[in-house]
């Protein structure tokens, strides 16, 4: 790894060099800040760059290491966080015009835990408005570094772009309906959506309280395991925080997949899916079978293909409650898409919400039962590469081409059920941008998912491809 391509190293690689004294955090941080300054005016992934805070943290990391105080694999490593995460003294806007002046006086729990682990915060990352699908006209749209005319994902679009383009070594994202997995898919990086409640949501601007998940985007599975290990764990400030111990995410990382049961419902996974992606997933399954995994045919539970219906009703209702103080009172400050989404949420009746909740509960019973018999379930990670043939600043009608192209039936199940999901690159489309798949597992099975991801990465090189920037 030369100085010219250090920005594309994995987190593990730079962490080893920092620990060995071969690389200083200050030098690495300065290099990343210079790359952000050179490239991000066109990629638009950062909402706020915190150069002074980053360099101060890097100096502290180097001083601690010189004194024999090593905090672990995030010590001195430059990272970024989605601009939904509270940061003391730094704007936290959530892509919302109504929050352009919102500056918290404390760090959210996940940010504070990154700091405790010794990570260096480079800045806050752009996203769709309110973490839904469209953008507020006052904010930038992050640009896919593989091809600028293709979608960069939502809502953690900037997180996917910044990791893929070598502008940080990990970025936190959130996932309510696919918002870690869509950007991971679109930008060819790894995304790990954890079990609901494994990572505290204290100090997080929410979209839907019952489905919001916070997790990492990285360039390989082991990097994702490291970051999730650092930010996970019980938090008394979050009533939905799990009390169970955090799994040892690297303990079985290199144990291979021999004997593991990996399921796929081909009728569900292949319907309406890009043929190239179908072929890439089949090739991945062949690879895993060759490593000793048992590939089994399964059937998704009833309601899987219609899960979008109940998801939209629940998500929109919860979002409208979160934004009740500013919408509709300041409706003119909202963008066309998110404003329309909140209006829809306000119009959902109690009967409609009850029906959606009942449908969610019924689906979850069947989905959890399916997962209990598997080590992982395979499906596309939200579809295939999507050209930008829609207006990202537009109203719900203008965004229809996106929703017709993106396949939320593959991402919504893990959000409705609160189960973990790992997204990995698994091929490349003719357009020159990545294909991805996801592994979904039982509650708190992140270590098993990472074990599968690690074995797949050791047998392939898709995760090592980099965009031409």
Image (spheres, helix red, strand yellow):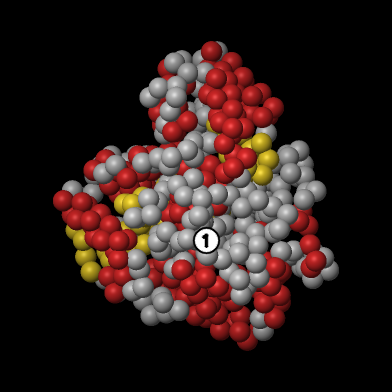
Q: Position of residue 169 (x, y in %)?
A: 49, 36
In the rendered image, the residue lying farthest to the bottom is: 351
Please state, as top left, top right, bottom left or bottom right, where the N terminus lies in the image: top left
In the rendered image, the residue lying farthest to the right is: 329
Camera-side residue of 135 and 345: 135
Camera-side residue of 230 and 122: 122
Residue 111's quadrant in the figure?
top right
Q: How would you rate the neighbour count of disc 1 (Cα within 10 Å): few for under 14, some for 14-19, many for 20 or more?
A: some
Q: Position of residue 38 (x, y in %)?
A: 59, 32
Residue 284's quadrant in the figure?
bottom left
Residue 59 appears in the figure:
yes
What residue lies at 67% left-to-right and 84% top-to-bottom?
A: 349
What residue lies at 55% left-to-right and 13% top-to-bottom?
A: 67
In the picture of the structure, the residue carrying the numbered disc 1 is: 388
Camera-side residue of 418 and 143: 143
Q: As drawn, is 422 to the left or to the right of 294?
A: right
């Amino acid at each position: 790894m030369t100085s010219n391509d250090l920005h594309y190293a994995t987190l593990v690689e730079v962490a080893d060099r920092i620990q060995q004294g071969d690389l200083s955090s200050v030098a690495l941080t300065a290099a990343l800040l210079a790359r952000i300054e050179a490239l991000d005016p066109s990629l638009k992934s950062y909402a706020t760059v915190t150069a002074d805070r980053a360099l101060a943290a890097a100096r502290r990391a180097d001083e601690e290491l010189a004194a024999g105080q090593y905090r672990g694999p995030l010590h001195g490593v430059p990272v970024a966080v989605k601009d939904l995460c509270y940061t003391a003294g730094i704007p936290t806007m959530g892509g919302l015009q109504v929050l352009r002046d919102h500056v918290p006086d404390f760090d959210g729990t996940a940010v504070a835990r990154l700091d405790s682990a010794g990570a260096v915060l480079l800045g806050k990352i752009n996203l769709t408005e309110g973490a839904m699908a469209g953008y507020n006209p006052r904010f930038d749209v992050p640009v896919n570094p593989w091809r600028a005319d293709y979608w960069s994902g939502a809502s953690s679009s900037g997180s996917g772009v910044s990791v893929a383009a070598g502008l940080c070594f990990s970025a936190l994202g959130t996932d309510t309906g696919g918002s870690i997995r869509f950007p991971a898919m679109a930008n060819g990086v790894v995304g790990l959506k954890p079990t609901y409640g494994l990572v505290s949501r204290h100090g997080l601007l929410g979209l839907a309280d019952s489905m919001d998940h916070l997790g990492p985007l990285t360039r390989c599975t082991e990097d994702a395991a490291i970051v999730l290990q650092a930010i996970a764990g019980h938090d008394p400030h979050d009533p939905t925080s799990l009390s169970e111990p955090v799994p040892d995410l690297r303990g079985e990382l290199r144990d291979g997949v021999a004997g593991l049961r990996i399921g796929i419902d081909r009728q569900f996974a292949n319907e309406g899916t890009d043929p190239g992606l179908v072929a890439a997933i089949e090739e991945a399954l062949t690879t895993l079978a060759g490593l000793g995994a048992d590939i089994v045919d399964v059937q998704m539970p009833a309601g899987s293909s219609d899960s979008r219906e109940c998801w939209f009703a629940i998500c929109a209702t919860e979002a409208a409650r979160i934004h009740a103080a500013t919408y509709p009172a300041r409706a003119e400050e909202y963008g066309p898409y998110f404003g329309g989404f909140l209006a829809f949420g306000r119009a959902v009746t109690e009967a409609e919400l009850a029906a959606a909740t009942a449908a969610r509960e019924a689906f979850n019973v069947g989905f959890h039962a399916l997962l209990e018999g598997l080590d992982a379930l395979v499906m596309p990670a939200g579809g295939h590469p999507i050209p930008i043939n829609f207006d990202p600043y537009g109203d719900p009608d203008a965004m229809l081409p996106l929703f017709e192209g993106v396949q939320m039936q593959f991402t919504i199940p893990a959000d409705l059920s609160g189960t973990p999901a790992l997204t990995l690159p698994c091929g490349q489309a003719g357009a020159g941008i990545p294909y991805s798949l996801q592994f979904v597992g039982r509650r708190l099975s992140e270590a098993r998912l990472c074990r599968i991801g690690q074995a797949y990465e050791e047998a392939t090189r898709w995760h090592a491809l980099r965009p031409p920037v």
